[in-house]
Image (tube, helix red, strand yellow):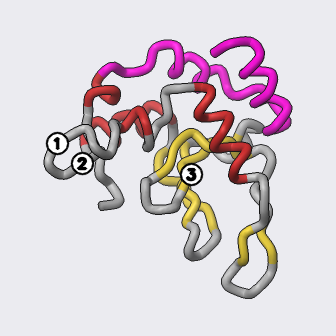
Amino acid sequence: MTPEILDQITELVGNVPPEEYLRLLIDYPEVLKSINRAIDDSTSEGTVADVELICDPACVLEINREARVDSVLKPDGSDFFWPDQFMIIGETGEGDYYCIDVDQDVAGVMQFDHHSVGFEVITDSLDEFVEMLVEDPFTDE
């Protein structure tokens, strides 16, 4: 990750991303770069590294910017604004995001459900999240 992108992400999310996440980007698992998302094993839908656990820091920055542009309507009709400290690290491909808490008040990886407009912790650590993706890269399909 370039210092410029790290500075922009830090400013956007209000804190430096956790060291565990920065190390993961440096030593990104090669297997996730090769697991195709399409059912027919083509590259038409990209790889896990393109979507579920984004390996490109510039794409991480962009998806976090996009999530903070507008509010989302909650089921009760009120506005939901993306929490600053929840940094998106990937998406399901179906409108939901995977994120981490840069303040580390919430441990592990959370999934944001766009239907209920809520968060659920799905793994207790980034390592568990990577293991989950390696074992079953299509957890939401």
Left or right: residue 113 versus residue 80 is left
**In the picture, which quadrant includes the N terminus?**
top right
Badge 2: residue crowd in 10 Å (few <14, some 14–19, many ≥20): few
CA separation in Å, label 3 and label 1: 27 Å
Magenta portion: prevailing SS class? helix
Answer whether labels 3 and 1 touch (C-beta < 8 Å).
no
**In the picture, which quadrant includes the C terminus?**
bottom left
Q: Which image quarter: residue 74?
A: bottom right
Q: Which residue is mark 1?
A: 41
Q: Earlier in the sequence, mark 3 or mark 1?
A: 1
Query: Please, what secondary structure does the residue beneath circle 2 have?
Result: loop
Answer whether labels 1 and 2 touch (C-beta < 8 Å).
yes
Left or right: residue 71 versus residue 94 is right
Percent x, y of residue 93: 43, 54
Mark 2 residue type = Ala
Q: Which residue is mark 3?
A: 110
Between 29 and 33, the residue placed more toward the observer is 33
CA separation in Å, label 2 and label 3: 24 Å
Mark 3 residue type = Met
Question: Marks 2 and 3: which is nearer the front?
Answer: 2
User: Residues in magenta?
Assistant: 1-30
Residue at figure coordinates x 24%, y 48% from the top left: 38
Q: Which residue is mark 2?
A: 38
